[in-house]
Image (spheres, rainbow, N blue to C red):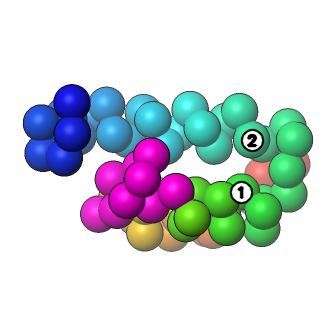
Amino acid sequence: MKGEAIPVRASIVAIAEAFDRMLDKMSLDEIIKEIEFESGKSFDPSLVPVFLEVIKRTEFK
């Protein structure tokens, strides 16, 4: 599926799962850069800014 054919929930899960996989291997700054780089490729570009805003407001260890 491509574009609008992909359910929004699936697009959110895709970003969240990728974030979770990267969390053990990369710094938060590196993860943010990678998600931004993949915006429009692997991730829905309309959801990336929203996801990143939530991430930037949350503390991760």
Q: Secondary structure at mark 1?
A: helix
Q: Could you say which is closer to the camera, residue 20 or residue 45?
A: 45
Q: Please state which amino acid type lies under the numbered disc 1.
A: Ile
Q: How far apart are the two marked residues, 2 and 1, measured between alpha carbons?
A: 7 Å
Does 2 appear above or below 58? above
Q: Please state which amino acid type lies under the numbered disc 2.
A: Met
Q: Local crowd at mark 1 within 10 Å, few (<14), some, or many (≥20)?
A: some
Do labels 2 and 1 touch, CB within 8 Å? yes
* Residue 23 image point, x, y percent: 78, 42
Residue of label 1? 31
Does 57 appear above or below 60? below
Instruction: Characterize the magenta stretch by its predominant secondary structure.
Output: loop
User: What segment is highlighted magenta in the picture?
Assistant: 38-46
Q: Which numbered tag is attached to residue 22?
A: 2
Left or right: 32 as drawn, with respect to 14: right
Disc on the earlier residue, 2 or 1 = 2
**Which residue is pictured at 31% across the width and 31% down the height?**
10
Left or right: 24 as drawn, with respect to 35: right
Q: Local crowd at mark 2 within 10 Å, few (<14), some, or many (≥20)?
A: some
Does 13 appear above or below 42? above
Q: Could you say which is closer to the camera, residue 52 or residue 31?
A: 31
